[in-house]
Image (cartoon, rainbow, N blue to C red):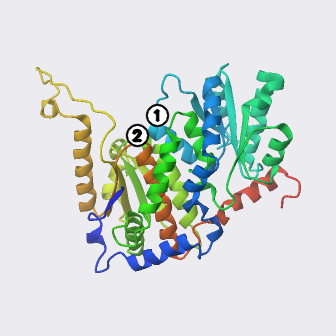
Amino acid sequence: MIKVDYSGAEQFFGNEAPDFAAAEKAYDTVINKTGAGFDFTGWVDLPQKIKDDELEAVIKTAELIRSRSKALVVIGIGGSYLGARGAIELLRPIPKKDDPQVFFAGNGLSPDYLNDLLERLGDVDFDVNVISKSGTTLEPAVTFRIFRKLLAEKYGKDADRHIFATTDAHRGVLKSLADANGWPTFVVPDDVGGRYSVFSAVGLLPMAVAGIDVRKVIDTAVDTFKALSERSSANPAMRYAAARQLLYKKGYGTEILACYEPSFRFMAEWWKQLYGESEGKDGIGIFPASVEFTADLHSMGQYIQAGPRFLMESVVRFAKSRSSFTVPFDPDNADGLNYVADRDLGEICSVAADAVKEAHISGGVPNIVIEVPSRDEVGFAQLVCFFELACGISGYISGVNPFDQPGVEAYKKNMFRMLGKPGAK
């Protein structure tokens, strides 16, 4: 199971300790569905529900796509793509020989990005998975219109066979289009917000197409949520939530999530959406940011080490690497590096992480270590369960509804008005 070590933050707690009574109360609020936004807490039961319902259909569809296509284009924005992209880049950063490549579109409005994507697709066979609860969000809707035209030009009357929709079970523009055109559909659950939807078809279909063992992911998630039900300070989700809220109270208003695996980049992007949308409201909230170590130690490292002291740092560390690489011995030692010769690169990286932790704490940055057992389906599933549950707990401790996102509508109203959408004000 994931372990949380906040010994590197304790000296910044002052005379207080993390409020585990508040964390336990917040946990009960999540699990018992008694708090604000309770109707969007279906993610807690989602792994078991998907296992009992859609999982095998998702896997069967993924096998179909893998058997006939070289690529899958996933069209979605926010929670409709970040979890899947985080999983794929963490677990399959380089596709295996026979794996289709999974591309992501509809998460922006850049014509350059779209044209670059089309150039990379070339003339290969591909399928489209469009993900939207409503079907009216501008970025994915416009992109889907473009890809429907491309599919029609490429496959003619068979174009509809290459479209799979993940959307509302009963209503919405995308659901209506899917029903009218006979596209296979999967469900975005009514009681699960986009950023919490990784364990639904939203995340699982692209993951399965990429070759990830989604059965193992879901089985692990079921077990992990059970393991995270312990009501004590040993519960890692409670430890993390309570510690970061105490640090926020002490004036550390920005949390930097760091990892020493470059493939973690989009997991950090998913984490930023999860915590930013859940906690940033009512004029309060910890600002979520991320860095990639060791690369960013040579850029952002200066600011972290010696800039204004409002930063806390949470570091995801995998207990073991998936592979090893030994630094070779050089008889000439012209570069002076024989002191690390015959040592594993993973060991050197671990020493670097320890050195950074010591330096940043001495520089006034509280440090929380989140240790994940392995960089595989098990570790990924545990990490998602951990972050989701800790986010709900942390949000309720701070006094906000962690399951709505009213602030994201402001720019949309302005954009629709400026674009001349009928009825927009």
Tell which residue pokes out farthest to the front in this image.
Answer: 52
Q: Are marks 2 and 1 in contact (CB under 8 Å)?
A: yes
In this figure, which residue is indicated by the disc labeled 1?
93
Give left or right: position of 246 versus 88: left
In this figure, which residue is indicated by the disc labeled 2?
262
Give left or right: position of 267 versus 112: left
Query: Can residue 334 be seen at all in this image of the molecule?
Result: yes
Q: Quadrant of the C terminus?
A: bottom right
The answer to whether residue 38 is above or below residue 353 is below
**Residue 5 sits in quarter:** bottom left
Q: Secondary structure at mark 1?
A: loop
Residue at left 61%, top 50%? 200
Residue at left 35%, top 65%? 309
Residue 134 is situated, as x and y percent measured from the top left of the image, at 76, 52
Which label sits on residue 167? none
Residue 91 is situated, as x and y percent measured from the top left of the image, at 45, 38
Residue at left 58%, top 44%? 204
The answer to whether residue 19 is above or below residue 156 is below
Residue 298 is situated, as x and y percent measured from the top left of the image, at 33, 43
Disc 2 marks which amino acid? Pro
Query: Can residue 397 be seen at all in this image of the molecule?
Result: no
Disc 1 marks which amino acid? Pro
Neighbour tally class for label 1: few under 14, some 14-19, many 20 plus, Cα within 10 Å: some
The answer to whether residue 110 is above or below residue 26 is above
**Residue 151 sits in quarter:** top right
Q: Secondary structure at mark 2?
A: helix
Q: CA distance from mark 2 to mark 1?
A: 9 Å
Q: Quadrant of the N terminus?
A: bottom left
Residue 90 is situated, as x and y percent measured from the top left of the image, at 45, 40
Q: Earlier in the sequence, mark 2 or mark 1?
A: 1
